[in-house]
Image (cartoon, rainbow, N blue to C red):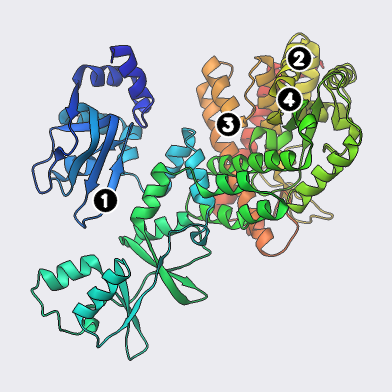
Amino acid sequence: MGTLDFKNFILGTHPFELLKNYELERVLESVDIAYFKEGEKVIAKNTLPPEHFFIIAKGIIKEIDENEEEHFYSAKDCFDIKAILNKNSKSDFIVIEECICFALRKDVFLDLTASNKEFSDYFVQDISSRINSLLSKGTTQNLASFMISTIEDDSYIHPAIFIEEDKTIYEAVYKMTENKSTSIFIKYKSGDIGVVTDSNLRKRVILKKRNFNEAIGTIGTKGLITIEKDDFLYNALLLMIENSVKRLVVTSDGDIVGTIEQIDLLSALSHKSYLIDIKIKKAENLDDIKSAIKDLSHLITSLQNRGVKVRNITKLVNELNSKVYKKIFELVFPKEVIENSSLIVLGSEGRKEQTLKTDQDNALILKDGFTFEGLQEYTQEFSASLIECGFPRCKGNIMVCNHFWTKSLQKHKEDFFEMLDNPSNENLMNLAILFDANYVAGDKSLFTSFKTTMLTKIVSNPAMLSHFANATLFFETPLTLFANFVLDKKEHKDELDIKKGAIFSIVHGIRSLALQHKLEITNTTERIVALRDLGVINEELANELLEGFNFLLTLRLKIQLEKESKGQHIDNYVKPKQLTKLERDLLVDVLKLVDKFKKFITYHFKLNMV
């Protein structure tokens, strides 16, 4: 492998892409290529730490850890950080398929972890932070599936077997062997339930040279850590990490049904394209789809409570939503329509910033000249199916069942030109959601053509771009000169709308700047980063906007989840009195930032002249 190939390989191996250029050059200078035959032991248990940190280029390595549990590593996996940091190896690493590794000198690896916090954090951070890191790098496919799945969805539950406390250790081991189980539950006469695992047997029986005829109840562990079978795999993994255990007791309405083991979850997280993708792909009707996406709000609540950043939650939710859209599209529409149309999502769905399903915004672009008898019936069924799956009807009727949003490519372009020529408030809002459009299914070339036309036309019309940017100022910032909140006095008494008062201004102002510079990306956070890198926004303002926008989305999600849990209508209104002092203070600061950003947009687009 040449230097360039190796460099590309390393950059494609997380977290090495976090290294600075000079750090990467040091890696290239300090790495050797190591070849290991099948059956060879790369690292031996209870030995001094290896002199190298290994990155697998080809082949498979099996780790057998101190509990005799097995873990597998393949291309782009790394090992063994634990041995290096702990200064000794507690595992055997054995080649089970001939292996080529890049061997990075230990001293260089340790220098990198000392000098680059992001790089170091990947190896030492907790599970929630690791998830944020993976998601921010776009490694979402397997992880999203893992996080949305419940324990009962897959074959992770090892069936429970029981034995009475006065049975012998030998009888318990025999029963475990007969059932191919690594644990057994003990029924005590007191009514308590205990557990014995294979590692307990090694430590408490074999190493202690105890008599196998002693009662199994004498070595049982009580105080079981349990999790309900309808909970998420993600929560099971976190519970294991928090309690430093390798298995949990799975219950159903309080009754023990089995165990779930950490090795199974980590294996799924690392190597499996997971259940939710399969369930949606295999769905044959709406009931199958609804089954696949059940308890989504439960998942969102769990992620937020665990500290996963809101932008990463939205990535997961919108990835799932897109797959649902695509599957319903394929179930409802005839193949001929699918091949001659492009399904797109608009607004917050197009920006991938939607969390709880507030409403659906979608459209259909038909190939020029294509007609299909009874098309309206299919568009009505599609919208109704989305509603049945939990995507509420759009109040503005921006859905494919509205003929205005289902039309030929040429008609879409003509109506777009009409909106540009007549920039009424309604047209400006329609333009805004169109500019955030994203492809979901069908013929992507139709969407690409429409998107290209939009970007080209708006950039060639600076005056129109200023009119468009002027919408950033549509809503007043709900803050007085003395930093007091301006609250609603009518239907939403003592509340303020953070979407109109803050979120919209940031989203639309950034959208206007992105259009001016022909950026095709739609996500607001990604647009801010791109505009910062282009020098359109200075680093200080960009960082303030990133933090402020994240705070607003996090606060809105928190309030919406609270309202949903109480059976209240989900909206964008926040009651400041119900916030903590820190949240109120931060909200004041962010609203001041919104005013600052509005001034920037006013100056940048010369809105005082519009």
Instruction: Give the amino acid type for the residue marked by disc 1 in the picture.
Output: Glu
Which structural element holds mark 3? helix
- Per the rendering, the mark at residue 525 is 3
Crowd rating for badge 4 (residues with CA inside 10 Å; few <14, some 14–19, many 20+): many
Dots 1 and 3: beta carbons under 8 Å?
no
Residue at point 63% right, 18% down? Answer: 519
Q: Do the residues bearing badges 4 and 3 touch, measured as CB atoms within 8 Å?
A: no
State the residue position of label 2.
Answer: 453
Counting residues from the start of the chain, the first of labels 2 and 4 encountered is 4
Amino acid of disc 3: Thr
The quarter of the picture where residue 60 lies is: top left
Q: Residues within 10 Å of mark 3 (few under 14, many from 20)?
A: many
Q: Residue at x 46, y 56 (%)?
A: 233
Lower sequence index among marks 4 and 3: 4
The spot of residue 429 in percent (x, y) is: 81, 30
- Inspect the image, locate mark 2, and give the three-letter code of the amino acid beneath it: Thr
Residue topped by disc 1: 70
Q: Mark 1 falls on what kind of element?
A: strand
Left of 357 or right of it: where is 46?
left
Task: Answer whether labels 2 and 4 touch (C-beta < 8 Å).
Answer: no
Q: Are marks 2 and 1 in contact (CB under 8 Å)?
A: no
Nearer mark to the viewer, of 2 and 4:
2
* C-alpha span from label 2 to label 4: 11 Å
Mark-to-mark CA distance, 4 and 3: 16 Å
Query: Is 130 left, or right, of 548 in this rendering?
Result: left
Quadrant in the picture for residue 215: bottom left
Closest to the camera, between mark 2 and mark 1, is: 1
- Observer-side mark, 4 or 1, equals 1
Between residue 481 and residue 452, name the one nearer to us. 452
